[in-house]
Amino acid sequence: MASKPTKASKKRVEVKVKINLWKIIIFSLLILFFAPFVLAILQGQIEDGQIPLSDAIADIKDEKVQSVEVEEERLTFTYKDGNTKISTKEATISFPELLDRAKINPDAVEYQVTDQTLTRAITEIASIVLPLILMAAFFFFILKMQTRGAQDIFSFGRSKAKIFAKGKQSVTFKDVAGVDEAKTELEEVVDFLKNPAKYRAIGARTPKGVLLVGPSGVGKTLLAKAVAGEAGVPFFSMAGSEFMEMLVGVGASRVRDLFGNAKVAAPAIIFIDEIDAIGRQRGRGVMGGHDEREQTLNQILVEMDGFTPNDNVMVIAATNRGDLLDPALLRPGRFDRRVTLDMPDKEGREAILKIHAQGKKFLHKIDWNRVADRTVGFSGADLENMLNEAAILAAREGKKEIEMIDIEEAATKVKLGPAKKRLQSDEDREITAYHEGGHALVAHFLPKTDPVQRVSIVARGMSLGHTEIAPTSNRSHETKSRLEQQIVALLGGRVAEEMIFNEMTAGAASDIKMATRYARAMVVELGMSSLGPINFSSDSEYGDFGNLTGFEESHISPHTQEKIDSEVSKIIDIAYKEAAAIVKKNRTTLDKLAKELLDKETLSRDEFESIVGKKSSN
């Protein structure tokens, strides 16, 4: 079935028709312009066969001429052999007089007199008027193109905001989950827009702006759409980068145009996504005080809280770099409310999964609580992508419904990348099996670590295998003992390699890097060492080109730095010895685990615990 043409496709067709029409007009004008010259050239080529009048009269006497066509002074002779020749006579002498002077009987040749006075007059007028018309049309076309170009230049200052009219935004708060605190804050914003008189009556000032801060994928843009859908007001959406152009002053002009349009449509919402593109702190870059970005920011500051009131226009902005924004943008009267969005907790992930599961066919036995446990650290966008990948995987295998195994594989793919079927030797597979088994075994027997959810020796991304350890409860704090045991679990792979094969491999490089990072953070930033609760890290300064700490002089003395290195080394050494003790004590279990990994390649939590036993509660 043929699909209906969209408005965009119709517009493209109209543009093409207009362009083709202009091409036809220009081509026709060019033909008309050059036609007289072509005719003149052809006429000159014909008249190149002219003969003297005396020769033509002689040919008539010799009865070689069949007929003569007389066009004022122009004579066209048609010979009996089919040739045609041209000659001229004086305009004051008629052709019969010419024959009489030559003593030729007028009946000796057929002749026809043609009156070309009107035709010649038209031709002469056309030869003068037509070039003038063509020149006028040409200059008119050039002028129109210049006018259009000038309009395009002036249109640079108009905002490129996407406008969603009242009632055209279908997203509501029912489509948002996992950010309950943010929803509560924004529900008040909706009430401000719907019932402003209620707040003015008691003397309250409605907030000018709401800043949504959080990592990518947690639903900042979705929340802004939900506010527009709930409030039922016009919604102007624009990205921070869309304000900027090559021309100086364009950004500020677009800000004025955007707020002007919103005030006309008030009450309305302006949504600026990635506002850190234009809202970075002023005076910190290398471009000086007249940077185009700073002019744009200054105009936003004036529009949000200047002399001209805009009580009926609400500004919502989103960013994942709230630490870079200018303080003047964050003060009360501009962005009065700052709503921080975090990664969803277990209940939030389960609610998000149920929203994105709508419209997909699942096996009835899907345990969404278990899926929520499996997806710790996933954002809302990650969860949506995971379910979509699960649907694609099930369809590729010819299934009619999505099963739990499809969701498990999709979650691993979203987190670590697709599986890679690398050609590995038996020795490499055995080393990987013991390495991952060492991670899982050590983590299982540590009381403060979370349960092992999955162990695999299937290569994904840059790793030859992986061990997934996900928390089963929501935690807000990390304790010293838990951090120390996480370092022990990270070193379990290297310990197993060294104990089983009496050798070290490069496969533990990322584990060692992460363990060292944890240990250094405990000493330098968290004060979890014998050096005491002191922060030894340097303050970071940010500019247009990122972190500028490389230009700062370190305030740590060499003696203190030596102590820091000693403390980090002590933490790593203790963790390594503890991991070695666990592996040595459970060597038989490690062998069983490695053998099972070599047979199945991937073990789920239930399969893993059937070998090592249930994990004791913390």
Image (spheres, rainbow, N blue to C red):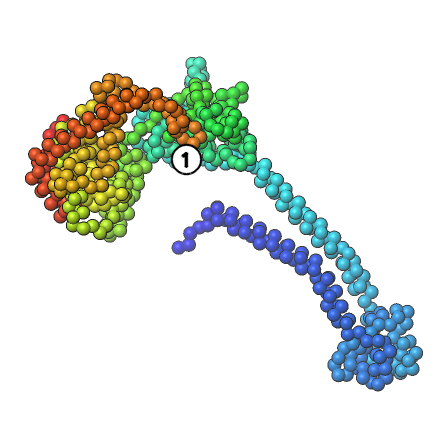
Measured as percent of width and height from the top left, residue 298 is found at 51, 25
Closest to the observer: 565 or 142?
Answer: 565
The answer to whether 62 is drawn above or below residue 465 in the figure is below
Quarter of the image for residue 357 reads top left
Instruction: Look at label 1 and name its amino acid.
Output: Gln
The residue under the point 82% across, 80% down is 110
User: On the rendered image, what quadrant is the N terminus found in?
Assistant: bottom left
Query: Looking at this view, is 433 or 203 the one in front?
Result: 433
Number of marks drawn: 1
Which of these two is toward me, 503 or 288?
Answer: 503
Residue at x 25% of width, y 22% of height: 563
Q: Residue furthest bottom?
A: 62
Judge left or right: residue 476 versus residue 426: right
Mark 1, other Cα within 10 Å: few <14 / some 14–19 / many ≥20: some
Q: Is 495 placed left or right of 537 in the picture?
A: left
Q: Position of residue 48 (x, y in %)?
A: 77, 72
Percent x, y for residue 531?
24, 19
Residue 339 pos. (x, y %): 36, 25
Say if residue 235 shows up in the picture: no
Helix, strand or loop at label 1? It is loop
| Residue at the front extreme, as displayed | 559
Which residue is label 1 attached to? 169
Assign the C terminus to one quadrant of the image. Answer: top left
As displayed, is residue 515 above or below residue 129?
Answer: above
- Does residue 328 appear anywhere in the picture? yes
Question: Which residue is at a point 60% across and 54% down the rendered structure image?
Answer: 23
**In the displayed image of the protein, which residue is found farthest to the top?**
203
Along the horizontal axis of the image, is 33 left or right of 578?
Answer: right
- Pick whichever, 435 or 188, lies toward us: 435
Residue lying at 67% horizontally and 56% vertically, measured from the top left:
29
Q: With respect to residue 13, does 487 lie above or below?
A: above
Up-down: is 551 above or below 113? Answer: above
